[in-house]
Amino acid sequence: MNASGPRCTTFEELIRIKQSASSAIVTKSSTLHPRSGNPSPRYYEDVLGSINSMGLPNEGYRSYIEYAHLLDKRTKPIIGSISSMDGDESFEIIHKCIESKAFSALEINVSCPNIPGKPQLAYDFDGLEQFLIMLDQISSDIPIGLKLSPYFDMVHFDIVSAILARHRIDFITCVNSIGNGLFIDTATDSVIIKPKNGFGGIGGKYLKPTGLANVRAFYSRFHKLRTSIDIIGVGGIYTGKDAYEYILAGANAVQLGTSFMQQGGDIFNTINTELMDICYTKGYTMVSEAIGALKTI
Ligand code: DHB
């Protein structure tokens, strides 16, 4: 499926995802009110990936409820992405989204790196636990997951998986962009994007080893803790082989961000075909047989 972010903000973009071979439709992270986002230029890509500081441009959650009703979750699952930028605001949105019955699942984004003055909740472990305590109070008949920031220290994987195991989380999506990277243009000796003096989230090929490691680290901890939390892998998936690597690491499903931004909806078909070829060659009858099957040496 698509990752929340590129090409999933307008109704027309969501229709195109529905018409593609994506297994689900994920919306742009929504806020209480529409936002135009940060000043441009706010996205740039090179051969290895992308930098963005979009600043959460979105049409407001009410529009995504309306769009999801029109897209009809019975014909393709629809995952509503909700920004956690402001606690009270996000609980109001979560509540209304569940009540609407428009979505198949909700992905709560606790990892946006691009709002000046708003730190990523995924890096504030006490804040994250407080947020999950509040979330536990909301009754939901659909799966609720968290979109996490990438972590880089083994002890952080231990802390976050222990927190998640204490609360009602059905899935995690690993990983959001690596926050606050910097691209430089030596023709002008200048930063390349305007917001935050050039700092932005890094996606694409730069992200794959970090994404794989995050999926693997959470998969092995969830296994030990006997939780039933599913994992959606995201970060640098351009080919069926990349998707297969995420599945071996422990992903139940994968999302496409920068590659979908660059190539559009045809990429879902390409990746599905390549992934099926790999699984056929390896002798699997179902892709799910490969989940977590990574060997160590
Ligand atoms: C934006 C970027 C993110 O990485 C994210 O998770 C949510 C929003 C943005 O800048 O729009």
Image (tube, rainbow, N blue to C red):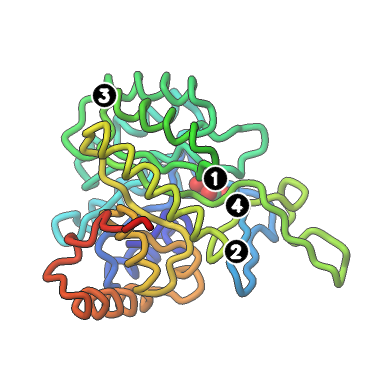
Q: Is residue 252 left or right of residue 199?
A: left
Disc 4 versus disc 2: distance between alpha carbons?
Answer: 8 Å
Q: Residues within 10 Å of mark 4 (few under 14, many from 20)?
A: many
Q: Amino acid at mark 2?
A: Ser
The quadrant where residue 265 appears: bottom left
Q: Nearer the viewer, residue 220 or 161?
A: 220
Q: Amino acid at mark 1?
A: Arg
* Marks 2 and 3 close (CB-CB < 8 Å): no
Disc 4 versus disc 1: distance between alpha carbons?
Answer: 19 Å
Q: Provide the residue designation for mark 2.
A: 50
Mark 4 or mark 3, whichever is nearer to me: 4
Q: Is residue 137 left or right of residue 213?
A: left
N-terminal of the pair, mark 4 or mark 3, is 3
Disc 1 versus disc 3: distance between alpha carbons?
Answer: 26 Å
Q: Is residue 67 left or right of residue 257?
A: left
Q: Position of residue 211 (x, y in %)?
A: 46, 54
Check the picture and name the quadrant holding the N terminus. Answer: bottom left
N-terminal of the pair, mark 4 or mark 1, is 1
Give the secondary structure at mark 2.
strand
Q: Residues within 10 Å of mark 2 (few under 14, many from 20)?
A: many
Disc 4 versus disc 3: distance between alpha carbons?
Answer: 31 Å
Q: Provide the residue designation for mark 3.
A: 138
Check the picture and name the quadrant holding the C terminus. Answer: bottom left
Examine the rendering and report whether any part of residue 69 can be seen: yes
